[in-house]
Amino acid sequence: MRLNFVPFLVVCLLVLSSCGEEVLPKPKAQLRLEYPEGTADVVNTPAYSFESNNLAQIRDMKASSLTLDYPALKGAIYLTYKPVEGNLVQLLSDAQKLSYEHVIKADNIMEQKYIDEEGRVFGMFYEVKGDAASQAQFYATDSTEHFLTGSLYFYAKPNYDSVYPAAVYLQKDVRRILETLKWK
């Protein structure tokens, strides 16, 4: 009888010693990336000017088209200028078509109109959510002489979760370009 009691006692001790604090799963966390607040520099081209983040490097400036490169974020904002020569409807159509080419991979595309009657800047800002190639796009025009498009791209395969912090940061810069745009 004594031999049967020993295994029973060992099992009871193991059960009692395993009782302790309740195990809780780790809470989900997000990667915290902080980017420096850049100061505004004025960029002048022959056709327009705007304020740009001083962290951006101007590349490939041809006439009034240029690239704002952000090497630390591995991204760039491409600005393309075209004069309006009786082809405003075609320019608007092309800009809208370019923005909606991302609808295949995008989860959502949010449109936001931009109107500055005093500066004669009229346009549209597109915020693209999802694994699309471009996370933000815009176009702006004065409807008589000038037409400007802008697109944000990253130098990586589109993965919205990975580029999200940088996309939010650069979308603010895209908005700043649109809001400070002045025609010459």
Image (cartoon, grey):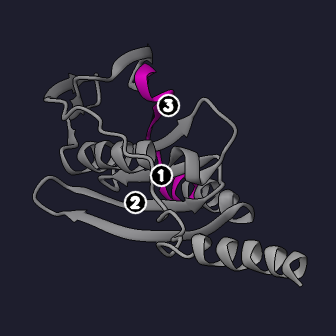
Report whether residue 130 is seen.
yes
Image coordinates of residue 130 in percent, x first then y, are: 61, 61
**Dot 1 corresponds to which residue?**
136
Q: Nearest to the eye among marks 1 and 2: give it.
A: 1
The type of residue carrying mark 1 is Ala
Compared to residue 53, the image places residue 161 above or below, namely below
Q: Quadrant of the N terminus?
A: bottom right
The residue most toward the left is: 118
Between 172 and 28, the one nearer to me in the picture: 28
- Stretch of the chain drawn in magenta: 66-92
Image coordinates of residue 134 in percent, x first then y, are: 57, 47
Q: Is residue 8 left or right of residue 154?
A: right
C-alpha gap between disc 1 and disc 2: 7 Å
Q: Residue at horizontal 16%, vertical 25%?
A: 41
Q: Are marks 2 and 3 in contact (CB under 8 Å)?
A: no
**Dot 3 corresponds to which residue?**
75
**Comes first in the chain, label 2 or label 3:** 3
Compared to residue 100, the image places residue 161 above or below, namely above
Identify the element where label 1 is drawn: strand
C-alpha gap between disc 2 and disc 3: 18 Å
The type of residue carrying mark 3 is Gly
Report whether residue 68 is seen.
no
Q: Is residue 184 left or right of residue 84?
A: left
